[in-house]
Amino acid sequence: MMLARLPAQAQSGLAATPMKLFFDAPPGSPQTLSVALSNPSPRVMEAGISLADWRRDSSGHIVYYPPGSQSNSCAAWLKVLPGERFSLRPGETKQFSVILQAPARADSLKNSMLFFTQLNTDSAKDERGMHILVAVRVGVQVIYTPPGQHKKDIDILAFSDSRDSLRVTLQNTGQLEANGKAACELLHLASGKKNKLKETDFYTLPGARRVLQWALPPGLEKGKYTATVMVDIGPEQELKIGELEFSHD
């Protein structure tokens, strides 16, 4: 028998609103925000609350760590009321108070993850016919930004090509979460023909690096190209542009 934890979007057992909590109270002052958790399933859900630290790797995937183990953690500053274990009747919604109190020394963005996890697991079969226990888990991102932290910025560190793809490395050099879009356009130098590649969304935390990759289109004409990447993190921020010349044989 295996245990599988599935995100709430893949099941109908738990649903949380909102999915992100943004705290910004002065250090030393408690701040309370609310999360509504509902049970749209036809059965009673027994659930529990836990915390975790998290970061995004260079590919953009979230990686979880034990609470309080990362330098960017705010898990120790959090308290959730009314309690760590609870039940939800079919169709019921409960309100939870999430209280964050940053210490007086807090001077940079911190984050953690608040998990609501099903405890009374369901039984199912996988594609091989094996019985598995399925538990639904929904995560709410918690982000704390001290007052006065306003700088949002991102840099293009590298732009390179391989036989069949282009690769851009970004770094968040600001004080805030920087989310945006990156677009890439190819210009065939001999013919002047342009080819726009698919726009890519990305998410970064301060100090983090993010690697974006575009596959070259099948049947792309051979020759020399200029690739232009444009990184947009919002209307009030500078559009970052990088260029690369490469040959496609």
Image (cartoon, grey):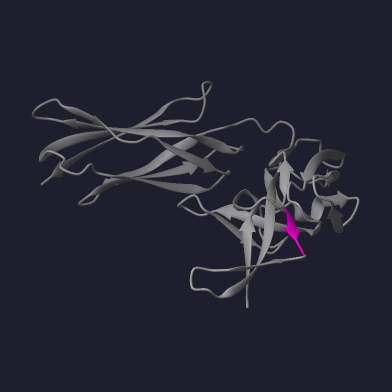
Residue 227 on the magenta segment:
no
What secondary structure prevails in the magenta region? strand
Assign the N terminus to one quadrant of the image.
bottom right
Q: Which quarter of the figure has residue 200?
A: top left
Q: Residue at x 81, y 45 (%)?
A: 102
Q: Nearer the viewer, residue 176 or 214?
A: 214
Q: Residue furthest right?
A: 82
Q: Is residue 117 magenta?
A: yes
| Total numbered badges shown on the rendered structure | 0
Residue 4 position (above or below residue 182) = below
- Percent across and percent down for residue 32 are 85, 39
Residue in the image at 80% along x and 49% along y: 90
Please provide percent x and percent y for residue 135: 68, 63
- The segment highlighted magenta reads 115-119
- Residue 147 vertical position relative to residue 53 in the rendered view, above or below: above
Position of residue 175 measured from the top left corner of the image (x, y, whole percent): 61, 38
- Is 124 left, or right, of 223 in this rendering? right
